[in-house]
Amino acid sequence: MPMIRLTVPAGSLTEGGRESVQSDLAAVLLRWEGAPDTAFFRAQAWSYLIELPEGAGTTAEDDEPRFLVDVTVPQGALSDRRKAGLAEDVTKTVLDAAGLSPNDALRVWVLVHEQPEGTWGAGGSVIRYADLVALAKGPRADA
């Protein structure tokens, strides 16, 4: 199941953005993964917001806020086309949450981490990508 983690400098998101960015990012991730839009799959898309203390992140050039998005998915869940679409939509979502314009897109980095087959455990057992595909197609996908 997918996981998305947004790391931001404290105070860099708007009030509304801070309230909605986690659920917005989870929805973007599920859409690009091709998962069914059901309560079950939404509950499996974990989203974290990590706010760094003031001064904890900078560049050699300036102190403008930078945003790091780490996405973890099972290996094989995202084609190159899906990764590109995910990166574009995640960037837009973060910029909106921070009240920034598309001109600030280079401040958002999206890193996709593909978890190798056999290395993702949940519920006390190893979850395989084929199991997730079958689950998405099966009766629980409608639950």
Image: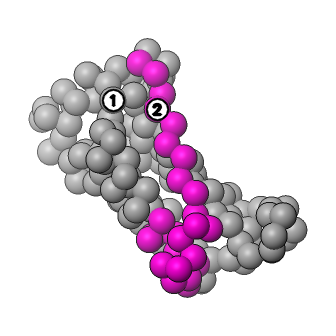
Type of amino acid at the residue the image marks with label 1: Gly
Residue 68 lies in what quarter of the image?
bottom right
Residues shaded magenta? 91-117
Nearest to N terminus: mark 1 or mark 2: 1
Q: Which mark is residue 96?
A: none
How many other residues sit within 10 Å of disc 1, few (<14), some (14-19) or many (≥20)? few
Q: Which mark is residue 114?
A: 2
Foreground residue, 30 or 124?
30
Q: At which x and y percent is residue 56?
A: 84, 62
Picture quarter with the C terminus = top left
| Visible residue check, residue 3 | yes
**Is 139 colored magenta in this rendering?**
no
Q: Does residue 82 lie above or below 135 as drawn?
A: below
Type of amino acid at the residue the image marks with label 2: Glu
Tag 1 residue: 76
Picture quarter with the N terminus = top left
- As drawn, the residue found furthest toward the front would be 61
Q: At which x and y percent is residue 15?
A: 59, 83
**Rendered residue at 26%/22% (across/down):** 130
Taking the image as shown, residue 30 lies to the left or right of residue 115, namely: left
Q: Does residue 38 lie above or below 20 as drawn?
A: above
Q: Does residue 99 lie above or below 89 as drawn?
A: below
Taking the image as shown, residue 86 lies to the left or right of residue 38, namely: right
How many other residues sit within 10 Å of disc 2, few (<14), some (14-19) or many (≥20)? some
**Rendered residue at 84%/64% (across/down):** 60
Contact between labelled residues 2 and 1, with CB atoms less than 8 Å apart:
yes
Q: At which x and y percent is residue 6?
A: 59, 57
> What secondary structure is marked by label 2?
strand
